Amino acid sequence: MRVAIDFLIEYGCYPKQTLTPEGVVDRVKGRQRAHSVIDLFRKSGDLRPVEEIGFEMARNTLDGEEETQVIMVKDLLDEAAALKPLEPYCQGCPANHSGQPFGCFGQIEYPISSKAEIWLLGQLPSTDETLIWLLLKQAVQEMKHDGAAVNPMRGAGMPYFSEQGVLARRLGEFTANTNMVFELLFLSGHLRPSYASVLLLLFKVIQRDMNADEVMRLSKSPEDAFELYPFLLHHEPDDDDCITQFKAFFRALYLAWGLNNRLLLDA
């Protein structure tokens, strides 16, 4: 089972050309996992050399069977060593949403908190914001985002949501729910700039005070997109870790849109 939603700005750069986008992501995640395992061992009083530390990972084979593989931490760190000489290319990169090396990549960790789901619902437009509300209604109806595909993810024992029930918000003549929100964001495939512009408006990432012609023009971002449409989401004192990660996701989506690149998803 997946433990996080991975997202990556598909921006052409030397590190991705050298290692491929998948190679960058796999090494970044492998390094994170290695350091987490080392930290866990040290906290439990295990002071063995890194070369002797390993952990088991279960995966499904092509024939549907589950097999367990022992992963050595040193192997992950050796693979990740290829990242080090490429880190300088991340400095000043327009796709670096976090300001850290390989900041074009990010994650939203499961389980998604109830507080984050409520926050996402609260970002949606009310009927007072007629144009953007109609945009939401159109996205829900035409793309058939009823949230049904998400129901199995809320079953007992599933790791994806803290809240097993479906939360809802009445928006005039229709009701938006948290399954629908998850489907809008993560079950439509990689996010192209045209669709990203819709999500940026629906979740109040950029200003909504614009006419229909301006909304239509956002499907391809202008050269001065970042000056014309500032990023509106900032850290608030009561944000939990999950909301913070969602804001980082929207920051990456915003940058991908402004650069006319896709945001690649693995949910």
Image (cartoon, rainbow, N blue to C red):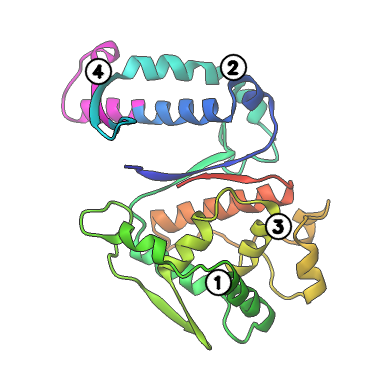
Quadrant of the rendered image containing residue 73: top left
Q: Is residue 4 left or right of residue 54?
A: right
Which quadrant of the rendered structure holds the N terminus?
top left
Of the two numbered discs 2 and 1 on the same chain, state the one appearing first in sequence: 2
Give the distance between the C-alpha atoms of the residues marked 3 and 4, in whole angstroms: 46 Å
Give the distance between the C-alpha atoms of the residues marked 1 and 3, in whole angstroms: 16 Å
Of the two numbered discs 2 and 3 on the same chain, state the one appearing first in sequence: 2
Q: Is residue 58 visible?
A: yes
Are discs 2 and 3 less than 8 Å apart at CB? no
Q: For mark 3, what is the residue?
A: 194
Are discs 4 and 1 less than 8 Å apart at CB? no
Which mark is in front, 2 or 3? 3
Q: Indicate whether residue 42 is drawn in magenta.
A: yes
Which mark is in front, 1 or 3? 1
Q: For mark 1, what is the residue?
A: 140
Hey, what amino acid is under mark 2?
Pro
Residue 53: assigned label:
4
Q: For mark 2, what is the residue?
A: 85
Q: Is 56 above or below relative to 121?
A: above
Q: Give the residue drawn at x 66%, y 26%.
A: 89
* Place of residue 69 in the rendered image (x, y in percent of width and height, measured from the top left): 26, 23
Quadrant of the rendered image containing residue 52: top left
Q: Disc 3 on helix, strand or loop?
A: helix
Which mark is in front, 2 or 1? 1
Q: Indicate whether residue 139 is drawn in magenta.
A: no
